[in-house]
Amino acid sequence: MNVQPTLNAAPPPELLMRVKDLKVHFPIKRGILKRTVGHVRAVDGISLDIRAGETLSIVGESGCGKTTLGQALVRVLEPTNGSIDYFGKDQNGTDIAHLGETELRPYRSDIRMIFQDPFASLNARRRVIDIIGESMRNFGVRDERELESQVAALLRKVGLRPEYMNRFPYAFSGGERQRIGIARALAVHPRLVVADECVSALDVSIQAQTLNLMQDLQEEFALTYVFISHDLSVVEYISDRVAVMYAGRVVELSDTEQLFAAPRHPYTAALLAAVPRPDPRSARAKRPTRLKGEVADPANRPTGCAFHPRCPYATDRCQAEDPQLRPVGSSLVACHHAEELMLKGVTVDAA
Amino acid sequence: MTIATQESETIAQNEPSSVGMATQRQLIWTKFTEHKLALASLVVIGLIYLVGIFCEFVAPRSPEHYDSAYTMLAPQPLKLWYTDDAGQTQFGLHVTGFSSQRDPNTLRRVFAPDESVIIPVSFFVQGQDYKLFNLIPANIHLIGPVDPSQPFYLLGADRLGRDVLSRVVYGTRISTSIGLIGVAISLVLGVILGGISGYFGGWVDNFIQRVIEFIMSVPTIPLWMGLAAAIPVTWSPIMVYLIITMIISLIGWTSLAREVRGRFMSWRNEPFVIAARLDGTSQMTIIGRHLVPGFVSHIIASVTLAIPAMIIAETSLSFLGIGLRPPAVSWGVLLQEAQNIRSLAEAPWLLTPGVLVIITVLALNFLGDGLRDAADPYT
């Protein structure tokens, strides 16, 4: 594998993928004639850069479009609009947003996915070797013995016994299945792995193991992760940068420490306030204000800032004018009042 | 914040064994064998189809063989012990003969069992010549009288003195195979149309579904009657048989198509299918290797449940006189011949095909239930 220089290399980190104004809209069809009466704007104009070797987390409430974004990045879905420039090993950007299935094929081995559900994502009728080896077979491993040794090596990497390769998925626990899923994602030496809620279905102890495994593998294979999650404690642990999504858009994008210590968007602050902290001092402190109301309906976006109906700091301007993502300090924030607000983050205690 | 970063040994400690290596087929079989009724039904169905396949060998006589001396003869029970001329009790498979008399009032011929006439019966006896599968000449019968000229009517005789047992056995071939062939046609139609409908979706799906709804809404019996009435009388029984099968399967494919469509639709976006797409697997391979194997077991189960409907359909068509016609022999044809008060009152043994229909249909239903329960061994 052609290993890219990783994080500790040059200060301007290498660009791996550049997403520009990405939109994924789903038509809402009604009636016998199936007329389109509207669109669910699941992803509604997202621009972000993914740097080689980093872990970029995408967080947000349910229904904010995280999963749709992830599926668009791996091109399970075709975006309605916008571009996804992927910078391959030769550093030439290719827009993969609107490629057909055959044209996408060369990129399928570079961009991989780890799924949320370790049960539904493994075909119960196929043996582990077939599941992990499927992509290897498709991308050139013809010799069965070669395949076996590669699968065995992968299984060892993810902490499973190579002898298990002839078993069927039903013989494994959730955590072991997720390891198989990770092995499948890594089977063809990918560069970018989109992990969609990949630890949400696991026990907390297994979550930690899986996250550690993912970090080890990231170092070993110089992987870039797009880590989609709603669990901020997991995100804090694993990511280099965090993008906060609300109603199909990124509202704040910044380094993990910066985001957790000093959020700039009221929505980020509200999310952080909702994270349970195992700290008696903060627990005794005044309860943080909870977010009121429902997450914005992506089919019927509020005017102006989509967050204004729930925002405690909303002004008339927020109602009328749609804020753009703009640099504030070292972060990118989509809020008119980002400079004025003094929002409380969570300080990372040394303890 | 702290996360438990205990790097525990996740490699399972148990020794590698055959655990977890059972294939889907083995799992289904294990689960199926727990269903005793279905297992018994499988045996019954197996026997019935064996009889159908080897009907020339199983039947003591040809279905056309008649003997005017034994019209409407009651069934002769098989007996094991008899008293020979010397008064000794002897062991030997046999049936007893009859003496016929005229009823002085009705002038009708009545048969009285005559215990003194012993007709020895044996397995694998030489009898009438036949061609097995219309190909291999033979004359060995599974069971029959040692002397082929003697009467042997285990299930009685009909109004022409034909052996009901032989006719039922020959009818088994046609009645059970019509179910199989009909289901095979339905299967092809159903899987193709259902697959197209579920995989492509959109207006194609809409169109096929409306056609299915239309076909389902047409009352079947009048439709069959209309179609069957259109079959020219001059056609040979074989042609009629084929056409009838097709008419019956015209209806049968609809529910199967719906089942296949449902599976396709629900599995098209399952994570494991998306995973296969991301693995670079082509669409056709995904269908063939990931989707179809998953519901083959369900298809087998629903097909098993569709066969009895076909058998019933053939039986009712023939019973109404618009299906198969003599000289073809099917259970429906036999029942149609028994369709009068005389046979009901005097020769209830002519209704044996009806009993067989019930047994077959019940057994197939139990078998289908068992298969359906076993089809998803992972739950």
Image (cartoon, grey):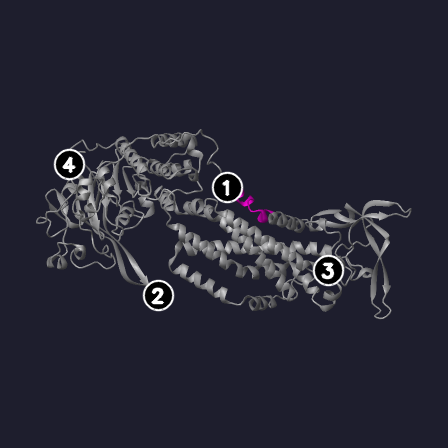
Q: Residue furthest right?
A: B86
Residue B39 place in picture, x, y as percent: 59, 46
* Residue B32 image point, x, y percent: 54, 45
Taking depth in this image into account, of A40 and B292 the one nearest to the observer is: A40
Sequence order check, earlier mark of 4 and 2: 4
Q: What's the chain of the residue with tag 4?
A: A
- Disc 2 sits on a residue from what chain? A
In the rendered structure, which segment of residues is drawn in magenta? B27-39
**Pointers 3 and 2 in contact (C-beta within 8 Å):** no
Mark yes or no: residue B338 visible.
yes
Query: Identity of the amino acid at label 3?
Result: Trp
Q: Do the residues indicated by labels 4 and 2 lie within the same chain of the protein?
A: yes
Residue B375 on image: x %, y %: 50, 47
Q: Amino acid at mark 1?
A: Leu
Mark 4, residue position: A12
Distance between mark 1 and mark 2 Cα atoms: 45 Å
Give the farthest residue toward the left.
Answer: A340
B340 vs B180, nearest the viewer: B340
Task: Work out how far the residue at label 3 is from the one at label 2, CA to CA, in angstroms.
Answer: 59 Å
Tell me the mark number nearer the camera, choosing from 3 and 2: 3
Mark sitting earlier along the chain (1/3)? 1
Seen from the viewer's position, the closer of residues A241 and B330 is A241
Q: Is residue B101 left or right of residue A264?
A: right
Secondary element under disc 2, as helix, strand or loop, is loop
Which numbered mark, 4 or 3, is in the foreground of this view?
A: 3
Quick check: marks 1 and 2 in contact, CB under 8 Å? no
The residue identified by callout 1 is B27
Q: Quadrant where the N terminus of chain A lies?
A: top left
Q: Secondary structure at mark 4?
A: loop
Decide: few, some or many residues near mark 4? Use Cα within 10 Å; few <14, some 14-19, many ≥20: few
Q: Would you say residue B36 sits in the magenta stretch?
A: yes
Q: Amino acid at mark 4?
A: Pro
